[in-house]
Image (cartoon, coloured by chain):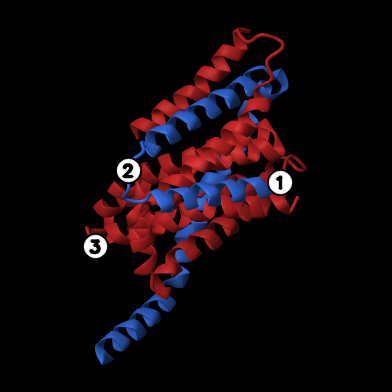
Amino acid sequence: MFWIILILFVGFGIGWLLQGKFKLPTGLITTISICLLLFALGLEIGSNKELLADLPKMGLTAAAVAVFGILGSALAVRAFSGLYRKLKERDLRKEGGQ
Amino acid sequence: MRDSLIIVGCFVLGVIVAVAGLIPESFNPSDYTTYMLYLLLFCIGLGLGMDKDFFASMKTGQLRHLLLPVATIIGTFFGCALAFVVLSIVSPGSIFLLDTVAAGSGFGYYSLSSIMIQDARGPELATIALAANLLREILTLLCAPLISKVFGPHAVVAAGGATSMDTTMGVAVKAGGSSIAPVALYHGFVLTVAVPFIVTLILGLY
């Protein structure tokens, strides 16, 4: 996992150094590497019979995570809205005072 | 949305190729996924580093703007814990709390999170994460008007998670007007950058 963060930072640093110098199709390269990775993930699941049999159960778990994830974040937004309004008023007052 | 379809198509194609028995015995897909994951992370870093908008959006980020992504993160984890409780009632002992939290910690960023989980926890949880994050994006696209009606337009941005800067931005703007666009962009940006760190953190808890 250490490598993941390190590589991310190395890429970021190189990108920052190259910024404005020339353009790279990073979006396209990223999409291609995602496609290759998901193809590999598909191969791994497809070649594992136990996993294939578990697909309906996995679908139920995924649906629960998705639905409750959305509901939880929507509720959190409601819960935080009062604090947001207070911070906004404070920021606006600060800007007005300058 | 077109990119999403192509990406899902690659996954389905992989399953079909394997089920049809077209891969040679000697080939082990997990060997090369790790190296492809490194390539992907390098590309993501490179893209962010080269993006001038990234620095601009970090500069304009006042404290209150961080509140929405923070609400999304806290709320999602809360929801994942609830999903664990519900799943444990339906079929006891089938899943760990950390599994649902890890699956949800992609915030819709299905490609990166599922691949990181695949690397650390194997294909079963990776598939759950892939489906959960894809469903999050699809459900947000479909249910945006309902979410907005019940919880307000900012909740649509939160529901979209990391995708609020691209695929789900349209429905958020439709729900809350064009003033939502910069909010959605910033929110998606913060979460996209945060996902590799959050997933690493969650996987480190096992």
Q: Secondary structure at mark 2?
A: loop
Q: In whole angstroms, how far apart are the C-alphas of marks 2 and 3?
A: 32 Å
Q: Position of residue B182 (x, y in %)?
A: 29, 60
Q: Amino acid at mark 1?
A: Ser
Q: Amino acid at mark 2?
A: Phe
Q: Are marks 2 and 3 in contact (CB under 8 Å)?
A: no
Examine the image and state in which quarter residue B157 appears. bottom left
- Mark 2 Cα shell of 10 Å, populated few (<14), some (14-19), many (≥20): few
Q: Position of residue A30 (x, y in %)?
A: 44, 36
Q: Is residue B26 above or below residue B40?
A: above
Residue most extreme to the left = B178
Chain designation of label 3: B
Residue depicted at 60% across the width and 50% down the height: A5
Any part of residue B134 in sight = yes
Q: Position of residue B148 (x, y in %)?
A: 34, 56
Q: Which residue is mark 2?
A: A22
Q: Colour of chain B?
A: red
Q: Secondary structure at mark 1?
A: helix
- Mark 3 Cα shell of 10 Å, populated few (<14), some (14-19), many (≥20): few
Q: Amino acid at mark 3?
A: Ser
Q: Is residue B171 above or below residue A36?
A: below
**B83 or B64, nearer to the observer:** B64
Any part of residue B160 in sight = no
Which mark is first along the chain, 1 or 3?
1
Q: Is residue A18 above or below residue B34?
A: below
Q: Position of residue B199 (x, y in %)?
A: 61, 50
Residue depicted at 68% across the width and 15% down the height: B27
Checking the image for residue B88, the label placed there is 1
**Which of label 2 and label 3 is nearer to you?**
2
